[in-house]
């Protein structure tokens, strides 16, 4: 059962949090609008699409990245006010332990963490897909929308495909060669003039011939047309840098597994994104404990000093996260460690601050 104290603190936490979200969202929209004003004018994008397709999805996207920081600032802001008004001291003097006082903070943090987890996994990626479509239509319409010439892709650990030209509109590959290897070396080569993707998930190969190497012998066959399956889909030719942002967590896992099954590699950015979506909600708990431990003590300087400490800690966390993820891409650090190391370090900081907090 929630007591009056619990409801009071939860209400303060959530109201302050969403006030911070509103203020920073407005600031972010103003800054982004000023940056893209020329793009809006040049592309003649309809106002309905600017608001409904772009900014309606831009706000959740930018907030999803900063929710843990919002939580830290919100806790510090309203807890400092409680401490400044001597409410924290009165609560502790009434016999409420520090651990009991922390409970409503963690309940509110759990509500926000659950919301962020859902947003990161489903809502924000679906919105990002619409936002990216808008950007590619009105901002970057001149860009090449994927791999179209001299495409090299792994189909599996032992096979790869070379495509001279790919026509995205018709899902047609021209001048195709598939090489298959075994433990002894090159096993077979399939060459075709054209390869078309069919709705049922197969590829139709036209004017093809195969060369199979059987020791010292060579088996050569040719044909006009045949339908077959490859571990290859039309979306494999799409190569947007922000494609991972438009994938739900379920789609991210499938993509990573598929790339690994093909030995294609280069999945670090996608694995970092997947782990970030889980680390963010957990970080809300950590920063809530840090913020409460710092702000519960009444000190000279009050809210201003507490907010400065909060901003400094938030900036330090973001810096550590960027630093550790750089090791993932450049030094071979596992993506899970790269994402969770800053969270683990801040967990230790939270424990130390809780022990030293005003009791």
Image (cartoon, rainbow, N blue to C red):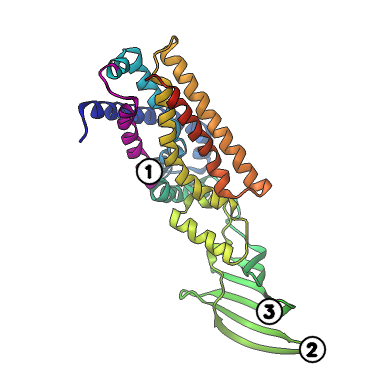
- Answer with the quarter of the image where residue 99 lies: top left
23 is within the stretch colored magenta: no
Res. 52 mark = 1
User: Magenta part of the protein: which range?
Assistant: 93-118
- Answer with the quarter of the image where residue 67 lies: top left
For the view shown, which residue lies furthest in the right direction? 216
Q: Which residue is mark 2?
A: 216
| Left or right of 152 in this view: 295 | left
Chief secondary structure of the magenta portion? helix
Mark 1 or mark 2, which is nearer the start of the sequence?
A: 1
Res. 100 mark = none
Say which residue appears at 65% left-offset and 83% top-offset: 208
Q: Pinpoint residue 282: horizontal percent, then vertical percent.
A: 43, 40
Is disc 2 placed on a helix, strand or loop? loop
103 is within the stretch colored magenta: yes
Q: Which residue is mark 3?
A: 191
């Amino acid at each position: 059962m929630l007591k009056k104290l619990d409801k009071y603190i939860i209400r303060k936490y959530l109201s302050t949090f969403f006030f911070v979200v509103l203020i920073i969202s407005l600031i972010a929209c103003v800054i982004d609008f000023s940056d893209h004003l020329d793009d809006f004018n040049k592309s003649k994008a309809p106002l309905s699409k600017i608001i409904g397709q772009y900014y309606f999805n831009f706000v959740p996207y930018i907030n999803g990245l900063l929710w843990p920081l919002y939580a830290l600032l919100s806790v510090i802001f309203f807890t400092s006010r409680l401490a400044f008004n001597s409410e924290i001291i009165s609560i502790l003097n009434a016999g409420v332990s520090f651990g009991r006082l922390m409970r409503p903070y963690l309940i509110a943090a759990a509500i926000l963490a659950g919301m962020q987890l859902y947003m990161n996994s489903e809502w924000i990626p679906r919105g990002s897909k619409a936002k990216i479509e808008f950007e590619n239509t009105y901002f970057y319409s001149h860009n090449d929308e994927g791999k179209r010439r001299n495409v090299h892709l792994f189909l599996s650990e032992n096979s790869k495909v070379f495509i001279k030209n790919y026509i995205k509109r018709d899902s047609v590959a021209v001048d195709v060669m598939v090489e298959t290897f075994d433990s002894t070396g090159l096993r077979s080569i399939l060459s075709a003039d054209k390869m078309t993707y069919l709705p049922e998930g197969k590829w139709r190969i036209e004017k093809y011939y195969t060369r199979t190497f059987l020791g010292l012998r060579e088996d050569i066959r040719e044909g006009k047309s045949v339908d077959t399956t490859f571990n290859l889909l039309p979306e494999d030719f799409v190569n947007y840098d922000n494609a991972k942002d438009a994938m739900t967590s379920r789609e991210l896992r499938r993509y990573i597994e598929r790339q690994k099954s093909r030995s294609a590699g280069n999945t670090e950015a996608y694995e970092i994104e997947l782990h970030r979506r889980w680390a963010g909600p957990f970080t809300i708990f950590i920063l809530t404990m840090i913020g409460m431990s710092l702000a519960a003590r009444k000190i000279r300087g009050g809210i201003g000093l507490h907010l400065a400490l909060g901003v400094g800690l938030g900036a330090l966390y973001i810096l550590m996260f960027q630093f550790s993820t750089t090791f993932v891409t450049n030094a071979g650090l596992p993506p899970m460690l790269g994402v969770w190391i800053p969270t683990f370090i801040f967990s230790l900081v939270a424990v130390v601050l809780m022990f030293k907090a005003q009791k």
